[in-house]
Amino acid sequence: MKTVQIFLVALVAILHLYFMILEMFYWTKPKGIKAFGLTKEFAEQSKVLAANQGLYNGFLAAGLIWSIISKNFSYQIAIFFLSCVIIAGIYGAYSTKKVKLFYIQSVPAIFALIITLLSSN
């Protein structure tokens, strides 16, 4: 069970590293524009905000990685950062009216959180 737990937490961390890279470095490039369904003009106007958002995704990934590399895996750190990811995904889906965002961001974190909670007992 611990292997599955670490795999799921690592998967969520990798996703957030990918989001960070897209938002910080590819927001105005074809890859970022396509990934987020933007226009070139909007991407240029919002690139500073996107970079800031990307930085936050990087912090989420760092926290999840921290939980994995902590001595004997830190359930508390994983639970906190997975909860942050879930809340961010719910709010992002609600505020942008893009349900897809919930499935991409929150659902993997929900699975990881469930497994983490079940494993911590």
Image: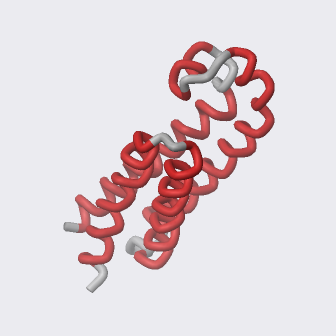
Label total for image = 0
Image spot of residue 85 (x, y percent): 50, 59
Q: Quadrant of residue 26?
A: top right
Question: Is 42 situated above or below 57?
Answer: above
Q: Is residue 68 left or right of residue 36?
A: left
Q: Nearer the viewer, residue 21 or 102?
A: 102
The quarter of the image holding the N terminus is bottom left
Residue at 77% over, 22% down:
44
Q: Is residue 53 left or right of residue 75?
A: right
Question: Is 12 situated above or below 120?
Answer: above
The extreme front residue here reads: 97
The quarter of the image holding the C terminus is bottom left
Image spot of residue 83 (x, y percent): 47, 68
Image spot of residue 34 (x, y percent): 53, 19
Residue at 34% over, 52% down:
108
Q: Nearer the viewer, residue 18 or 42?
A: 42
The extreme left residue here reads: 1
Residue at 52% over, 36% down:
18
The extreme bottom residue here reads: 121
Residue at 37% over, 46% down:
103
What's the image's color scheme? secondary structure
Image spot of residue 13 (x, y percent): 47, 50
